[in-house]
Image (cartoon, coloured by chain):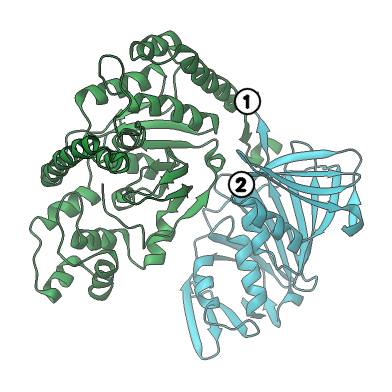
Chain colours: A cyan, B green
Amino acid sequence: MFKAEIRSDTLKSVVNIISTLIDEVKFTVDQNGMELKAVDPAHVAMIEMQIKSGAFESFSADNTEIGVDLDKIKDVLKLAGASDVISIELDEDRGKLIFKVGNITRRMNLVDTSSMGETKVPQLDLSASVTVPVSELQRGIKASESISDHIALTANEAGFSLSCEGDTDSVDLVLDKSVLSELEVKSEVRSIFPLDYFSNLVKAVPSDLSVTISLDTDFPVKINFDMADGNGNVRYLLAPRIEND
Amino acid sequence: MGVNLSGVIECREVDLGYLSGRKVTIDAYNTIYQFLSIIRQPDGYPLCDSKGRVTSHLSGLLYRTANLIESGIEPSFVFDGAPHELKRTTLDKRKTRRDDAEKEWEKAVREGDLKKAFTKAQQTSRMTDEIRDSSMRLLDLMGLPLIEAPGDGEAQAAYMCAKGDVWASASQDYDSILFGAPRLVRNMTITGRRKVPGRDEYRTVRTEIIESEEALKHIGLTREQLVDACILMGTDFNPGLSGIGPKRGIKLIKDHGSLEKALKHIGQDIPDYEDVRGIFLDGEYSDAYRLNPEDMDRDGVIDMLAGYDFTESRIVSALDKIDSARAANKAKRQQRSLDSWF
């Protein structure tokens, strides 16, 4: 059993973030909320997401799994204003998920989850961690997009920087430690990442949030943030580009 | 030539460096024509060696390709195979236009009008067997992948791009989109300040990327429908209807859904339209190609180009550029998957 109501802007953020990686996903649901682990087909990035029942306007559920096509939920979201409440109900007998937006009812087939395996999550011990406003990262990306297809993230005692070096031009976004709410660095760390993945994620995160970036040299980056007033949590891992042997 | 969709297709301007680390396949005829047209002396004469052989294309292929490789791009070249019989009319027309331009060029040179001479000379560029063969020989000596298409080169390029073997197809023509290439790069081999054709002004040419899916979405047509719209306005394979340009053609297909219905609506007929459609949608292509560069034959390149009166030191510096760029690209960072950290 699953029946819930959620604000359209909350659902939109959730869908936008996950769909940067993958379109068909499996939510695991219990009475306390729902969670998801998903990895993109190239295994370059993954998302772990938890949404507590508090993120919903109303929520009641037993243990179950729901497979959905996020493109279809995007269609539903187009029908709703930001503050509209969307109701979602699982019809297990017919294998359908039913969305209601005002006087519109949209029924969609569930996606078969039997072929979706468990996503393994690498255990990483990353030495540096820094908390930055997403709006700053969004500006850094905007400045980088026509320059190159990769960016370097660096953390040292002075602060955090996002740099992008192209053929002839380069861009640096430098965030001094005075503007960072948290900075933990043992020694300077730096890794290089594909700009498209990083940019798609950062653009999907609501711009009033801050994210905690855990970083090391030539290691995946972990981007952790809370959403929906602390009722949702996202951990995003992105693999680096590394020098050839 | 191809269809002209410049006013209706959305593109994104980028630095050449944006293409770094990517395999791009180049429409060889299209690029060689550009070199033949642009690389000329002030009176319009192409670069020639002491035997009177044209060398504009070799100069372009050596120096411009060296620049591309230096930017981290991995280029390959697709050559057209036998032209489709429907392209004959277009080719004949081009020949007539070239012959006319040739006369006007000679006249302008006689009258001392250099500006006009250059413009007219640009329109006389032709692909001879000598130019095709020497281009292929040079690229081969440089170790660059060459693909001989069974039919239209752009159809082959689009096929390799759709398969994901190359990141993009590079051509000045928009036909690649019709042939189904997911991504087209324009202005890759020529960048910087260029003369506007037919006018006495210059503008800065920047490399453009066109994502076909986005471009089609923006126009509001499927690829099949865009092919239909282009058949209305005319392609290399059919003359099109008079008075129908990109805007009108697209609107007609948008309003009526397909070429058949649009033709019925305006009460006109296009013979062979199904064949033209077939050329774009079911083009001929080959799976026999390699896209990784081989070691260049340094002495071979130097011998060949010295035979065309190129200065040895300039050849060597271009080849050095290629060698050091290839070494740097090899050392370049590669994307890892998360699986490495389990």
Same chain letter for marks 1 and 2? no
Q: Is residue B151 visible?
A: no
Q: Nearer the viewer, residue A206 or B116?
A: B116
Indicate the position of residue B49 as horizontal and vertical percent values: 31, 17
Residue A35 to residue B283: above or below: below
For mark 2, what is the residue? Answer: A147
Can you say which quadrant of the picture contains the C terminus of chain A? Answer: top right
Q: Are marks 1 and 2 in contact (CB under 8 Å)?
A: no
Q: Position of residue B151 (x, y in %)?
A: 21, 37
Position of B162 with respect to B258 (left or right) is right
Asked which secondary structure carries label 1, the reply is: helix
- The residue carrying pointer 2 sits among few (fewer than 14), some (14 to 19) or many (20 or more) residues within 10 Å by Cα, namely many
List the single residue furthest toward the front. B111
Mark-to-mark CA distance, 1 and 2: 20 Å
Residue visible at 41% across and 57% down in the picture: B213
- Identify residue type, mark 1: Ala
Residue at horizontal 63%, vertical 37%? B336
Q: Which percent across, then down, holds residue A243? A: 67, 29
B60 sits left or right of A11 in the view: left
* Residue at x 29% of width, y 43% of height: B119
The amino acid type of the residue labelled 2 equals Ile
Label of residue B331 in the image: 1
Query: Relative to A98, is A131 above or below?
Result: above
**Residue A185, picture quadrant:** top right
The image quadrant where one finds the N terminus of chain A is bottom right
Left or right? Give the position of B108 relative to A59.
left
State which chain disc 1 sits on. B
